[in-house]
């Protein structure tokens, strides 16, 4: 199960700041010459701003193909957790690492903030954390002030806390396993750069993560296969295959890859294609998925909601289902094939027309 985290009592302590340019555009890197001390009165409010984006995220951990002792980010974080005096040196080193990794033309320059945070609660224990935030844009802010007995308005450029582009929160928890890391990247397109190249983290392969990943992976794969074979006459409705995958997760307590392939995919061709699809996903994400794990029923429910709820047919007809029905459409829909017309058909059962 994911750890239970509370930021209620958290306080931001010291900051290391940097301006991260783009090496290929000859934009420089500028880092703090000394630690910025946060006023006592601002520590809790800044912690609230810094930590707000890190709620309900998938937990990660640092990972290295040989040993964590060879992992640059893991070592910088360990040094900072070991001594408050190490924040400036290792914070600047983290900024230099980010600058060195920012070579892709799509990566934007921006402002970096690295903050030490204390009194974060995780699984009932108080610990400290390191928060890394990157903002790639500035927005105008309006402020009203008093001058010579009258009011006047000023326009300033600054960072909108709600629009921070990338972030990482490392908690001093599970140190021997690569710490407990929460991360986000709102840009989407550069997430591989942020998660893999810069941070070097992979998801913690717990039951919720694996359930969610495999349920969606299977449903997406089967949907794709169905679409690629729409020209073929099929004895089962187009939604049955993806539902078969979800039903497997609903009925089983434990996932077993061989069993799943036999019960859901069935044919050797489908198994081979799924294996290839899975390998592609693993390559893109930089980590392998387990073949066996305990199923998280909560995450099966989440996956069910992602099953397509609309059917767009080539005759111009569109059938839209409510989310609750999309998971079990066979309750009111019946699929068949008309030999005379050589066309598929869908029969709809209902009690009354509510639009009247």
Image (spheres, rainbow, N blue to C red):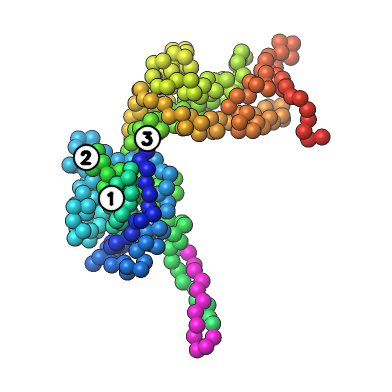
Quick check: is 177 in the magenta stretch? no
Location of residue 173 (image quadrant): top left
Residues tagged 2 and 1 counted as in contact (Cβ below 8 A): no
> Going from the N terminus, do you reach mark 3 or mark 1 first?
3
| Residue 1: numbered disc | 3
Which residue is the site of mark 2?
A: 176
Estimate the spatial distance between the alpha carbons at disc 2 and disc 1, rounded to whole Å. Answer: 15 Å
- Can see residue 124? yes
Location of residue 89 (image quadrant): bottom left
Query: Can you say which quadrant of the picture contains the C terminus?
Result: top right
- Can see residue 25? no
Q: Residue furthest right?
A: 356
Secondary structure beneath disc 2?
helix
How far across and down, in percent of the image, does residue 182 sit?
36, 45
Secondary structure beneath disc 3?
loop
| Residue 287: numbered disc | none
Which residue is the site of mark 1?
A: 127
In the rendered structure, which segment of residues is drawn in magenta?
Answer: 139-150
Estimate the spatial distance between the alpha carbons at disc 3 and disc 1, rounded to whole Å. Answer: 19 Å
């Amino acid at each position: 199960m994911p750890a239970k985290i509370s930021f209620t009592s958290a306080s931001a302590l010291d900051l290391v700041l940097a301006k991260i340019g783009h090496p290929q555009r000859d934009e420089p890197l500028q880092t703090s010459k000394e630690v910025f001390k946060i006023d006592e009165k601002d520590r809790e409010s800044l912690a609230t701003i810094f930590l707000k984006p890190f709620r309900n995220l998938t937990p990660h951990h640092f990972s290295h193909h040989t040993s964590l002792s060879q992992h640059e980010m893991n070592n910088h974080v360990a040094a900072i957790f070991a001594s408050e005096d190490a924040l400036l040196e290792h914070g600047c080193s983290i900024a230099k690492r980010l600058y060195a990794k920012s070579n892709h033309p799509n990566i934007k320059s921006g402002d970096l903030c690295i903050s030490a945070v204390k009194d974060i609660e995780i699984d009932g224990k108080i610990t400290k954390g390191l928060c890394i935030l990157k903002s790639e844009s500035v927005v105008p802010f309006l402020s009203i002030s008093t001058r010579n007995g009258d009011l006047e308005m000023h326009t300033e450029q600054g960072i909108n806390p709600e629009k921070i582009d990338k972030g990482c929160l490392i908690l001093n928890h599970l140190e021997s396993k690569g710490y407990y890391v929460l991360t986000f990247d709102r840009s989407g397109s550069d997430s591989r750069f942020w998660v893999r190249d810069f941070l070097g983290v992979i998801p913690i392969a717990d039951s919720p993560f694996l359930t969610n990943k495999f349920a969606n992976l299977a449903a997406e794969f089967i949907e794709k296969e169905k679409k690629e074979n729409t020209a073929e006459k099929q004895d089962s409705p187009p939604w049955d295959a993806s539902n078969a995958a979800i039903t497997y997760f609903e009925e089983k307590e434990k996932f077993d890859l061989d069993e799943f392939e036999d019960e859901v995919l069935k044919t050797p061709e489908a198994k081979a294609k799924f294996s290839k699809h899975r390998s592609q996903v693993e390559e893109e994400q930089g980590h392998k998925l387990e073949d066996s794990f305990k199923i998280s029923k909560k995450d099966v429910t989440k996956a069910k909601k992602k099953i397509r709820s609309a059917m767009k047919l080539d005759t111009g007809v569109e059938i839209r289902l409510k989310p609750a029905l999309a998971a079990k459409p066979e309750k009111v829909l019946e699929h068949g094939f008309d030999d005379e017309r050589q066309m598929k058909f869908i029969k709809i059962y209902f009690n009354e027309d509510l639009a009247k």
